[in-house]
Amino acid sequence: MKQTQLVLISGMSGAGRSTVAHAMEDLGWYVVDNLPPALLTNLIKLVSPTIKRIAVVVDVRGREFFNDLNNSLAELTESGLNRQILFVDASDESLVRRFEATRRPHPLQAADRIVDGINKERDRLREIRSSADLVIDTSALNIHQLEHKVSEIFRTDENADLRVNILSFGYKYGLPVDADLVMDCRFIANPHWKPELRPLTGLDPAVRTEVLAADNVQEFLARYQDLFETMANGFITEGRKFLTLAIGCTGGKHRSVAIAEELVNRVTKGKKLAGKQIIATAVHRDLGREV
């Protein structure tokens, strides 16, 4: 019998929790929004006989009920349930802009400023963020990009033991806050300086060939793959289901994109590591942002 999967969706107000919930609902998950944490165990007992993929949004809108979350998580862990925590985050600047655009107050703002409410919420959510299996930073994502990212993560083989998100990014746009491991590929000769390659991206065969044939790249890929497999073994042993590997270059257009795509080919393709199934997908955070 298929084991019940539970994903707890939490995160900062304005970061995109509702978008994540809607995307998972579109993928066939049974989604419950703003459930008091004390009712989690009862919900699982009620629906798990017939529903095997459940997502629950838990956040500070629950007010005093949110304090029951740790107890509920402990009960679920003791029951042996396959559960993960997804935390949706964004920079303070992004959150302030979003609240100002909608002209809605932050739920913890009261008579203070928006940023004061954000600070209170970060403090209250600090513990659950630190224990999250997957953190998605939506600072640079629009609604459609966030929906696509959620789809890439949760539409894959539900029997996978580890889902790996390989994220390309540009250093000039800032480090991704949701990465478990960040690697720098700016040591590779930049295709940007070749006029025929400049308008292309790392998804184009000509750029991919140029990047993968550059000095030391094959050695870098082999050593990175070894490092990943060491980490993956540990994460699987610890019960982690998600891993984000970030690969950065200057603008996130050529080198990091090509390397991320190559790593997906090396990590997945139905490969099993120590008998475990691994599914990898590539997400290119800054592709298309160049001016």
Image: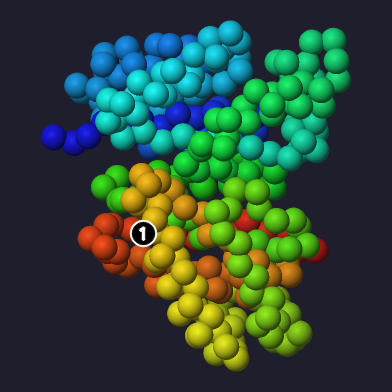
Residue furthest to the left in view is: 1
Residue 206 vs residue 190, the one in the foreground: 190
Where 115 falls versus 147 (above or below)? above
> In which quadrant will I find the N terminus?
top left
Q: Position of residue 214 (x, y in %)?
A: 59, 89
Whether residue 19 is visible to the viewer of this picture, yes or no, is no
Residue at coordinates 58% horizontally, 53% vertically from top-left? 179
Amino acid tagged 1: Asn
Q: Position of residue 277 (x, y in %)?
A: 28, 57
Secondary structure of residue under mark 1: helix
Residue 13, above or below 71? below
Residue 146 falls in image quadrant: top right
In the figure, 218 relative to 130: above or below? below
Judging depth in this view, the residue of 194 and 68 nearest the camera is 68
Question: Dot 1, crowdedness within 10 Å: few (<14), some or many (≥20)?
Answer: some
Asked which quadrant contains residue 129, the reply is top right
Q: How is the image coloured?
A: rainbow
Q: Is residue 228 left or right of residue 279?
A: right
Q: Quadrant of the C terminus?
A: bottom right
Q: Which quarter of the picture shows residue 289? A: bottom right
Up the image or down, 159 lies above or below 88; here it is below
On the picture, is 144 further left or further right than 289? left
In this view of the protein, which residue sits in the foreground, 282 or 142?
282
Whether residue 20 is visible to the viewer of this picture, yes or no, is yes
Mark 1 lies on residue: 233
Q: How many marks?
A: 1
- Give the camera-side residue of 194 and 156: 156
The residue positioned 75% from the left and 26% from the top of the image is 118
Question: Looking at the image, which residue is at 31% across and 26% down?
Answer: 78
Name the residue at 76% across, 85% down. Answer: 193
Q: Position of residue 32 (x, y in %)?
A: 43, 19
Q: Position of residue 39 (x, y in %)?
A: 40, 11
